[in-house]
Image (spheres, rainbow, N blue to C red):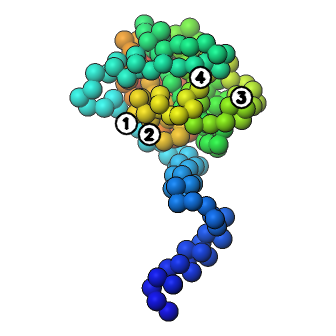
């Protein structure tokens, strides 16, 4: 049997095993990326990265225009003067759904000192609304249907949480699910607010 025939047979068997038969190559890449993020989240692994070198910290955060779930347009620049936690999430992301109740709890704890904005990334609006309702999130939510805000803020994976200081500078980026304790520790460390 030739190498090409053997490779095709092996790929076909894997496709059937993993439910990818008939799935386009671009969707395979997306499924693989999601699987890696989920695996990292399940393992409790978070990728942490500081503010990118050589970039004016405030430039990305100020430039991001958003449309809230309430239909109102706003920018992250409106939060200048107040530390901000920006969390990118989606209904198709199990780690996102798992961390949202913890984010709500920490938001309530730091309310008045730190603001939160949850940005729904590349998602179905109805599924996103249902997840927000079911997790009880009350902080401001916005839509990012084409991933433009995610790209502007240099998101790493799903979920991604970005910590922006009072001057509008990105001071830390974390990819992967966070517990309430981890989120609290990151706020205390990078936004210098303690409880």
Contact, mark 3 vs mark 1 (Cβ under 8 Å): no
- Separation of disc 2 and disc 3 at Cα? 23 Å
Observer-side mark, 1 or 4, equals: 4
Callout 2 crowding tier (Cα within 10 Å): few <14, some 14–19, many ≥20: some
Q: Of callouts 2 and 4, which one flags the residue occurring earlier in the amino acid sequence?
A: 4
Return the x and y of residue 70 as percentages of the image width and height: 67, 16
Q: Of callouts 3 and 1, which one flags the residue occurring earlier in the amino acid sequence?
A: 1
Compare residues 37 and 42 and report the one nearer the observer: 37
Q: Of callouts 1 and 2, which one flags the residue occurring earlier in the amino acid sequence?
A: 1
Per the image, label 2 sits on a secondary structure element best described as loop
Contact, mark 1 vs mark 2 (Cβ under 8 Å): yes
Asked if 135 appears above or below 42 in the picture, the reply is: above
Return the x and y of residue 90 as percentages of the image width and height: 61, 36
Q: Of callouts 1 and 4, which one flags the residue occurring earlier in the amino acid sequence?
A: 1
Per the image, label 3 sits on a secondary structure element best described as helix
Observer-side mark, 2 or 4, equals: 4
Q: Left or right of 3: which side holds 178?
A: right
Q: Pointer 1: what residue?
A: 49
Contact, mark 1 vs mark 4 (Cβ under 8 Å): no
Q: Which mark is residue 129?
A: 3
The residue under the point 33% across, 29% down is 51
Callout 3 crowding tier (Cα within 10 Å): few <14, some 14–19, many ≥20: some
Asked if 122 appears above or below 44 in the picture, the reply is: above
State whether residue 139 appears in this view: no
The residue under the point 59% across, 26% down is 143
Q: Pointer 2: what residue?
A: 156
Compare residues 59 and 24 and report the one nearer the observer: 24
State whether residue 88 appears in this view: yes
Contact, mark 3 vs mark 4 (Cβ under 8 Å): no
Q: Pointer 4: what residue?
A: 142
């Amino acid at each position: 049997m030739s190498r090409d025939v053997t490779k095709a047979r092996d790929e076909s068997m894997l496709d059937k095993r993993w439910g990818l038969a008939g799935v386009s190559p671009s969707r395979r890449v997306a499924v693989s990326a999601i699987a890696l993020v989920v695996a990292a989240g399940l393992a409790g692994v978070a990728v942490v990265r500081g503010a990118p070198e050589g970039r004016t910290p405030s430039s990305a955060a100020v430039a991001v225009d958003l449309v809230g779930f309430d239909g109102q347009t706003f920018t992250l620049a409106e939060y200048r003067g107040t530390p901000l936690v920006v969390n990118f999430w989606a209904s198709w992301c199990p780690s996102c759904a798992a961390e949202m109740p913890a984010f709500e709890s920490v938001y309530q704890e730091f309310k008045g000192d730190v603001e939160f904005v949850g940005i729904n990334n590349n998602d179905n609006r109805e599924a996103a609304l249902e997840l927000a309702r079911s997790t009880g999130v009350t902080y401001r939510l916005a839509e990012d249907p084409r991933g433009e805000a995610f790209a502007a803020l240099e998101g790493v994976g799903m979920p991604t949480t970005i910590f922006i200081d009072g001057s509008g500078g990105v001071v830390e980026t974390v990819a992967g699910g966070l517990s309430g304790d981890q989120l609290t520790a990151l706020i205390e460390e990078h936004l210098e607010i303690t409880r």
